Image (cartoon, rainbow, N blue to C red):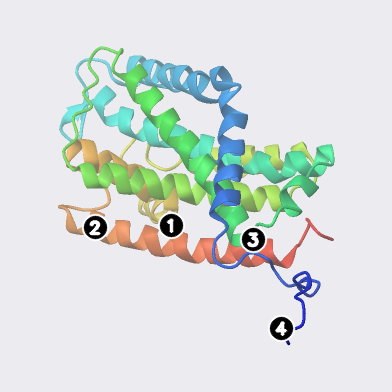
Amino acid sequence: MSDQAPRGPAPFRPQGEPTFTGVNWLGLWSLYLKEVRRFFKVQTQTIWAPAVTTLLFLVIFSVALGREGREVLGVPFASFVAPGLIVMGMMQNAFANSSFSLLSGKIQGTIIDLLMPPLSEGELMAGIVGAAVTRAILVGLAVAAAMLLWPGVTLAPVAPWAIVWFGLMGAIMLSLAGLLTSIWSEKFDHNAAITNFVIAPLSLLSGTFYVIDNLAELFQAISRANPFFYVISGFRYGFLGESDIGQGAEPVVQAAIALGLFNLVFAVVVYRILKSGWKIKD
């Protein structure tokens, strides 16, 4: 007979000690798919409608301001406006997607479905932001396809790295802003207030329809304090090879680095707020 005592069932971990170690990839992927499927079920509203709305912006401003062969930065006005409208649509829809995730759970009483699964705060944030960026990319592709239907618009990549980088940075920045809004908001009116009084003005006053050199010095300084300006101008540089950030590629590269650092700091702030449980676990 063996002297070894029979082994009993493995003991449970102490209460509060996580069972998963490392990254819960399966849970993260499941959350990401849930968020993507949520907006894909109403893709007419979440993807195609923004493309139509943005095309109407292009039509209206091209007809109103682009007459008689007007050129901006050496290209027709429609080609100047188009890149800014594409990335503006991407950012606004990234915000709309992430700002709805936690808020809808609060209002419907289903937020426990996001808090109870074995997901860390970082994984929860990554899943929500990742889905919002996915929607932004799909909207950007749909808007670009719609833009090509308008005569006089040319979307030929000159600096593909700038298109990819500034598009992603803009989408991530607004996804984080949307998640922060979703944490803070207690009803849909709060969300709408941020959309109407913060996101929309920053988008429209970012140089999408004009170059800031035409503004007075005070308003130029205000524009340069707006991070949306650098996203839109950098994204436009990817198509035109010109921007109103500065002459040449060096100012654009500097803006790209600055946006990356800004998003990194912003992500840390949002993560700390999410981890604290403020407005969610209170």
- Mark 4 neighbour density, 10 Å: few (under 14) some (14–19) many (20 or more): few
Compared to 176, does 79 lie above or below?
Answer: above
Residue 31's disc is: none
- 135 is higher (above) or lower (below) than 221: above
Between the residue at mark 4 and the residue at mark 2, the CA separation in whole angstroms equals 71 Å
Whether residues under marks 4 and 1 lie with C-beta atoms below 8 angstroms apart, the answer is no
Question: Residue 101's quadrant in the figure?
Answer: top right
Of badges 3 and 1, the one in the foreground is 3
Identity of the residue drawn at 73% across and 87% down: 3
Name the residue beneath numbered marker 4. Answer: 2
Front tag of 3 and 4: 4
Whole-number angstrom distance, CA of label 3 to CA of label 4: 48 Å
Q: Could you say whether the residue bearing mark 1 is in a helix, strand or loop?
A: loop
Residue 24 lies, in percent from the top left, at 58, 57
Q: Are marks 3 and 1 in contact (CB under 8 Å)?
A: no
Which residue in the protein does label 3 denote? 121
Residue 253's disc number: 2
Tell me which numbered mark, 1 or 2, is placed earlier along the sequence.
1
Q: Secondary structure at mark 4?
A: loop
Q: Which mark is residue 225?
A: 1
